[in-house]
Amino acid sequence: MSASAIVMMIVAIVIVWGGLIAAILRLRSHPQETEPMPPGVHRAE
Amino acid sequence: MTDQPREQWATRTGFLLAAIGSAVGLGNIWRFPAIAYGNGGGAFLLPYLVALLTAGIPLLIMEYSIGRKYRMSPPAALRRMSRPVEAIGWWQVVISFVIATYYAVIIAWAVRYVGFSFGQQWGDDPEAFLFADFLRAPDTPGFMDGYVPGIVWPLIAVWIVVLVILAFGVRRGIERANKLFIPLLAVLFVALVIRSLTLDGAAAGLDALFSPDWSELGNGSVWVAAYGQIFFSLSIGFGIMVTYASYLGRRADLTGSAMVAGFANSSFEILAGIGVFATLGYLATAAGVGVDEVAGAGIGLAFVAFPAVISEMPLGGLFGVLFFCSLVIAGLSSLISIVQVVVSAVQDRTGMRRMPAVFGVGGLVALVSILFFPTESGIFLLDASDHFINQYGIALASLVALVVIAWVLRQLPALQQNADATSAIRLGHWWRICLGVITPLVLGWMMVDSLRAEFEENYEGYSTGFLLSAGWSVAIGALLVGVILTLMPWPAGGEDIDLDMEAPADRKDV
């Protein structure tokens, strides 16, 4: 593989997979607010 | 009917896995690698990322907001936004109907190819095996010629699986299935990529895929290709994400979820690019030719090039099982979401319960699929329908929807406020600029581009008569049927149905 191809492969992996990890971490740091169930309905499981 | 509460995802992860399962489909595996290779290789990353951030994720956020705000599938949700716009929702539902009918057929082929992988039953000439022996395709397309039993049975099986999963509902059916499918797909595909990287010639394939040709960045068509890839691979524009988001809770995070789903889809595409090109590098090296001679996309890549590789390599049968099982799982999780659009649209407008809706409406989709596509000319019908419904269905409907929502109804600020109220990442002006200006301009350009190509020469050299009956009529028919469905008097009157079981006083549109 040429050096430029190796660099671009690494850049692609770092940006896209890094973006995924960053997005997951960001979402996890924002815990979901629980909402009240409608009257008469109970949460399953 | 009105006391039936709307279903909800059990967990945020469940919703995300379903959204990712819908986005990750056949296009990620067989379209992305060839598009990247043909449009600048490594340099394609730049327009691709720009397209993801300026069109893909903003559109995902818009569809999530519409679904979550109105908690309805596209026709009913858009009707609540503005009555006449319901037509766009039905147009998208009919597009989903059409796509589901032929998408299932490709999954059925992949099911058969899992079996063919044992003993490499395609022999020395996978292309002749596919078209002559397996599909029994004639040289020129006919209409409703004989059925091919080898496709009919797996197709029926695919439909039974899909309808049974949908019958279990959003939480126990779709969510549970995706909680199984997505990790399984990841394991199978990672195993496949690792195996492909250990093949002789893998480096040559990766070199071909990732070597950047920076001069291509000045070429407008490369940018259109990047937006097209993002657009078609994210399952946006035909109602899926509106439908899935309608089962979210009122406090669910939208922008953070859209970022995760968007990047997860692209992560899988990069992985697929590596796996596919490492494998093609092996095939080229074994045949003593350049990678450019074996690089392909779509049906040719999956059902001709890959079988050729499988025959060449040691333990090829196992590799074939991994590859075709990946196609089946990626396809199934997408097909489930496409059919759910149709089922839930009818449920929301009629108040019909899940079981009759799944087996009545979903059953109708299955019936059309089984009647029209497992025929000898089915491959041609599939090819033409796919091309025309993509270009003049999905892309055109999205362009119309964006122009109407952003410019006619001026709903973007309200949707932004709705998303911002509960989300980890706040939207700025950039979101409205992306959706109001950049994406419509690019979609408009794509439309002009493809129309010009259509009139320059017939798609794939098919006869004009065939293209009119199997291509144009499908795309134009989707719009017409959408309008007719809007004008139909629905039994329960539409907007009066409240599946939320909330007292009016508790209801607030955030």
Image (tube, coloured by chain):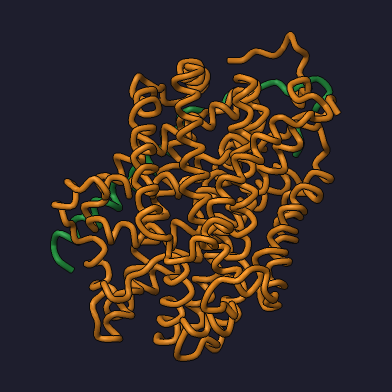
Chain colours: A green, B orange
Q: Establish if B418 lies above or below B471.
A: above
Q: Position of residue B223 (x, y in %)?
A: 27, 45
Name the one closer to the observer, B88 or B499.
B88
Left or right: residue A32 compared with residue B156: left
Q: Quadrant of residue B190?
A: bottom left
Name the one closer to the observer, B19 or B144.
B144
Q: Residue furthest top?
A: B505
Left or right: residue B280 compared with residue B354: left
Q: Position of residue A31 (x, y in %)?
A: 52, 28
Q: Position of residue B170 (x, y in %)?
A: 70, 42
Residue B354 visible in the current orientation:
yes
* Residue drawn 72% across the image and 12% down it: B506
Q: Quadrant of the N terminus of chain B?
A: top right
Q: Establish if A44 lies above or below B453.
A: above
* Residue drawn 63% across the image and 61% down it: B104
Q: Establish if B112 lies above or below A6.
A: below
* Residue drawn 34% across the image and 40% down it: B445
Q: Quadrant of residue B141?
A: bottom right
Residue B183 visible in the current orientation:
no
* Residue drawn 73% across the image and 46% down it: B172
User: How many labels were placed on the picture?
Assistant: 0
Q: Position of residue B22 (x, y in %)?
A: 55, 48
